[in-house]
Image: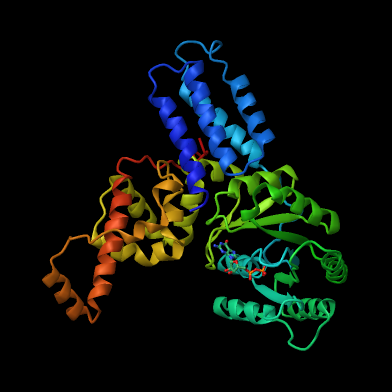
Amino acid sequence: MVLAELGGSISRALQQMSNATIIDEKVLNECLNEITRALLQADVQFKLVRDMTTNIKKIVNLDDLAAGHNKRRIIQQAVFNELCKILDPGKPSFTPKKGKPSIVMFVGLQGSGKTTTCTKYAYYHQKKGWKPALVCADTFRAGAFDQLKQNATKAKIPFYGSYTESDPVKIAVDGVETFKKENCDLIIVDTSGRHKQEAALFEEMRQVAEATKPDLVIFVMDSSIGQAAFDQAQAFKQSVAVGAVIVTKMDGHAKGGGALSAVAATKSPVIFIGTGEHMDEFDVFDVKPFVSRLLGMGDWSGFMDKIHEVVPMDQQPELLQKLSEGHFTLRIMYEQFQNILKMGPIGQVFSMLPGFSAELMPKGQLDTSNPKLMTDSRIMRIARGSGHQVHEVMDMMEEYKRLAKMWSKMKGLKIPKKGEMSAL
Ligand code: GDP
């Protein structure tokens, strides 16, 4: 899960402060020190962190707060706002529209996750009813075309490339022409990366951009470089008109917060983040819901979007009712499993709910011990009767137990009506 440690540390600091009987200067300083430590550990630039804490102290003037004011809420709101400020990268230069042909060119260093991200981006839009297509103009890296071809085939997305043509500009132009004729509305051009920023890479990028005239250039970068992302983003921006950024590998690195804040500091709009190797481990980046999820405050609009996206209309009210009752049965699991699977990784979906900070759902949670909900002989009977392996039935029970635990935490949860879904 994205930035689980950072989110957990900040939430804990806020929680500890909330536990204090009186919130005075000492308690506030301790809380801010904890938050500072967590942000520095995530490789957020020192100056940004210092400015943030100074601002919070300015806003939260304890002496000025009249008695009766909810100091905790004011402090929490200030932390939320300041984190949003640090991470807000602004809006992209162009947003493709469904049904209107757009050309999107991807650039980035080799290994940043560019090719994987091109497919994720295409797949994301395909699920929303677009007609995307992929063009492999990376003639530098051996195997680049095969990789794109493999990914595209898996996602059933049309692709274009060549094993023999060595001119990336020609491939890009031919590919774009081909897909324009086929009425694709999102033509994605994957370009070469290099091991480091070098003149040849930037020159090739410029030539491909000049020949294909992309509506949007997306720069893909690996979050593991932390605050060094600032220089990398600047260098790419100076060579080609970067209109948006996708930050990858937010799942595996403590430095993700540093990378995000560094990119934001270059005013390069981050539009998506990569959170794993799989096709659907890809999240829209929207600063307020992101910070809200990071702090375990939930993201109602994201959660409801998911529900509306995958659960049939007539089942939605009943499902929401059952969610708020917190009672989860095998029947609900059976009825909803296909929907839940379509939603994407379950941890991601639950992290949109208040009280479910990312830290609560480490990946290893799947490995919980034997549920002991059923006797061995019953499990064997079910396996025999359904024509499945015993371990498959056990896996299903594991999954049930895990979901039931999360579901039970939702008891009494007030699901807001439309229009009430602000982050805080
Ligand atoms: P390229 O050279 O920039 O085209 O990079 P690739 O697309 O080949 O990706 C390099 C490696 O990073 C591959 O092993 C990908 O599976 C992996 N990768 C890409 N995005 C992510 C991500 O968001 N999370 C994780 N964990 N791995 C990723």
Name which quarter of the figure residue 54 lies in: top right
- Which residue shows up at 73% across the image and 60% down it? 218
Count the numbered circles shown: 0
- Which residue shows up at 24% across the image and 57% down it? 329
Indicate the position of residue 208 as horizontal and vertical percent values: 84, 70
Left or right of residue 192, residue 279 in this image: left
Left or right of residue 33, residue 315 in this image: left
* Vertical arrangement, residue 393 with respect to residue 10, above or below: below
Q: Is residue 275 visible?
A: yes
* Vertical arrangement, residue 347 with respect to residue 424, above or below: below
Indicate the position of residue 210 as horizontal and vertical percent values: 88, 67
- Which residue shows up at 70% across the image and 67% down it? 110
Q: Is residue 297 visible?
A: no
Left or right of residue 330, residue 197 in this image: right
Indicate the position of residue 345 as horizontal and vertical percent values: 44, 61
* Vertical arrangement, residue 264 with respect to residue 335, above or below: above
Which residue is nearer to you in this view: 194 or 54? 194
Indicate the position of residue 185 as horizontal and vertical percent values: 70, 70
Name which quarter of the figure residue 273 lies in: bottom right
Q: Quadrant of ligand 1?
A: bottom right
* Vertical arrangement, residue 279 with respect to residue 150, above or below: above
* Snapshot colouring: rainbow
